[in-house]
Amino acid sequence: MKYVIIILVFFINLKSVAQSLVKYELVINDTTLVIQGENKKVIAVNGQLPAPTLKFTIGDTAQITVINKMHHETSIHWHGLILPNNQDGVPYLTTAPIKPHSTFVYKFPIVQTGTYWYHSHTMLQEQIGMYGALIIYPKNYNATKDQIMLLSDWSNENPIEIERSLHQATDWYGIRKNATQSYAEAMRENQGKTKTKNEWKRMMAMDVSDVYYNQVFINGAAIQKNENFSAGDTVRVRIINGSASTYFWINYAGGKMNVIASDGMDVEPVPVDRLIIGVSEIYDIEIIIPENKQFELRATTEDRTQFASLFLGKGESVSNASMPRLQYFEGMKMMNDMMTISGNMNDMGMAMSLQQMDMNAIMYPELQEKEIITLNYNMLRSPVSTSLPEKPFRNINLTLTGNMNRYVWTIDNQTISESDIIQIKKGENIRLIITNNSMMRHPMHLHGHFFRVVNQHQAYSPLKNVIDIMPMETDTLEFHASEDKGNWYFHCHILYHMMSGMGRILTYENEESSNLPEHPLNLKKVYHDDRRFYNGAEIALQYNGSIGEISRSNTRWLFQTEWRVNYTGDYENEFHLGRYIGEKQFAMFYTGWDIRRNNEKENTETWFGQTNTATKRSVLCLGLQYTLPWFIVTDIRIDQDGYTRVQIRRDDIPVSKKIRMWGLVNSDKEFNIGARYIVSKFTSIGGSYDSDLGAGVGLHITY
């Protein structure tokens, strides 16, 4: 596994009092050294997680030299900055990728102030530490009472393996988080009816995040302290969520927090008890050190499995109380009411927007004990008018869609590679009306522009470049198309959602749209991300033989081979090439073959009065698989000889946290039933009874 190390070299060359050229060098290396604590959790990666902070003053010109010493190409995106399109840093879309062992110089004027960050936009590099804070100060700003709080998530797994696992619908991360919501757990909590209804609607277990992380960090450490503040000090904390896929709750042990900026733009102070910060979002808050003690500013993951701490002040420590475990079955009840059996959201007649109705709140035990003021977007007010020029708006409606079972994330049920580019013109007022018709939150980020989040403050609606859109919400964003040219990316900033296709490209049609005309295949490179294939396997090695399948699938296609074989030479092998159809991909048409030989079996009559040819068969076939309620997969096929087979199967029945059952029966009067106990992510101990192979126990491999 590779970990990214960024080394910083910094110097300033003053050109004049009014403007300076600020130069940085970012040297990017590979390393495999990981420092671990006694509990085996990663606590640092060569002390360089995250990358260093870049600091500028408005009016500067930034010149940042990126020296790529890796064996892989890379890129840097300057998140939230207004800059020329060819400096935006999205490889193959706006800026050429930085090839291995090469150097690229970014140069652009600094035209704004605020808290921002930078990160790689190449594959999954952001997950392994390639990000850092970027702060732009007003002139003559005193930063002595400032504190940066850069949040991140860390997994001991290679992010390539994380991504593959998500596309295989493994529930291993749910096991690690104690969030499987199995039938045994449902019975213990008198929620058997809730669990049954959940699976009737073909929904997986309730969760608020996709990945289990081994640790989360603040500025590269699980615990950080700053003792440079005293009683009575007001501290500006610049909170940046630089994680790949984790939302964080922010709580302060010293009292209320005043929110004073969001995504780099000032807002009128809003006092709150807590806030949730979406992936890639930024909040500046002011807190007061009430006395000479160290007060904890805690960042807790939304699933409440991990937290990191920043202690500010001097003296004894004052900590926050831990956030209680989520009441998952209460969330499952809510989800059952929100979702139709067809897999779409039921709006239930509610007008939801701007985080004002958190449907997950039903899972928060702390709200049953006291009233807590939680930040939402309707509370944010710009100190200056954000009204756009007086001209008509062009409305663009977008619906956030997805398939959690197959981990396909889309807009209007299309991945970025399947969709048309959105053409805009300089000088237009654009209104994006976005509805979330999925069960996940999505932090949507627009490159190179700020948009108005239209709320109760109307002309003083806040400016942002990231908006967290919750399930069932509809939010309205407005921006003025002010750029001269270029392709600008609009995407979900959960890394694994973006890579699976949840994004759109906005292109200025009145000017040359591509900054890289010498590379005609650039757009194909961008589209490649959501077309990639992922491997999977389920293999049982038992004393009576082997049963298994190996698959390779992407957003729409599946290649699959399955087998049954004993140790006397009898075997069955089927191969399917399938295409998923429909918004929720419950159906798949396929073609393939069926080859088998069984010397110990006699031909019998099927359910349909045909002769079972299981003793010897070699045929091509066409079929349809359809996922029924309770995740029962019905398979109907016909082969070249007119032989018809109907099969039903159910895999991965969650009996308990670590016990899974399955069953299969078909019109050839074949059946298989079994169970396994999960030992690790890839291994289980299990047994089964098969109509052909008989009973067996052995090792089960899941990949």
Image (cartoon, rainbow, N blue to C red):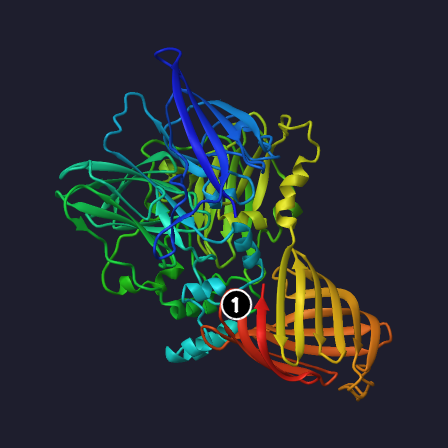
Q: Position of residue 238 (x, y in %)?
A: 32, 38
Can the viewer see residue 661 in this picture?
A: no
Where 384 sits versus 331, above or below?
A: above
Q: Position of residue 299 (x, y in %)?
A: 32, 50
Could you say which quadrant of the image residue 451 lies in? top left
Label 1 is placed on what type of residue? Met
Could you say which quadrant of the image residue 509 lies in? top right
Q: Residue at x 81, y 82 (%)?
A: 615
Q: Residue at x 73, y 74 (%)?
A: 636
Q: Position of residue 672 (x, y in %)?
A: 64, 81
What is the residue that sits farthest to the right in this orientation? 641
The residue that mark 1 highlights is: 203
Where 658 sits versus 454, above or below?
A: below
Q: Nearer the viewer, residue 6 or 433?
A: 6
Could you say which quadrant of the image residue 670 lies in? bottom right
Q: Nearer the viewer, residue 86 or 564?
A: 564
Mark 1: secondary structure: loop
Q: Residue at x 48, y 46 (%)?
A: 127
Instruction: From the viewer's perspective, tell me whether residue 131 is left or right of residue 299.
Output: right
Which corner quadrant holds the C terminus?
Answer: bottom right
Circle 1 residues within 10 Å: few <14, some 14–19, many ≥20: many
Q: Nearer the viewer, residue 426 or 439?
A: 439
Instruction: From the viewer's perspective, tell me whether residue 174 is left or right of residue 260.
Output: right
Can the viewer see residue 283 in this picture?
A: yes
Q: Nearer the viewer, residue 186 or 330?
A: 186
Q: Position of residue 193 (x, y in %)?
A: 45, 79
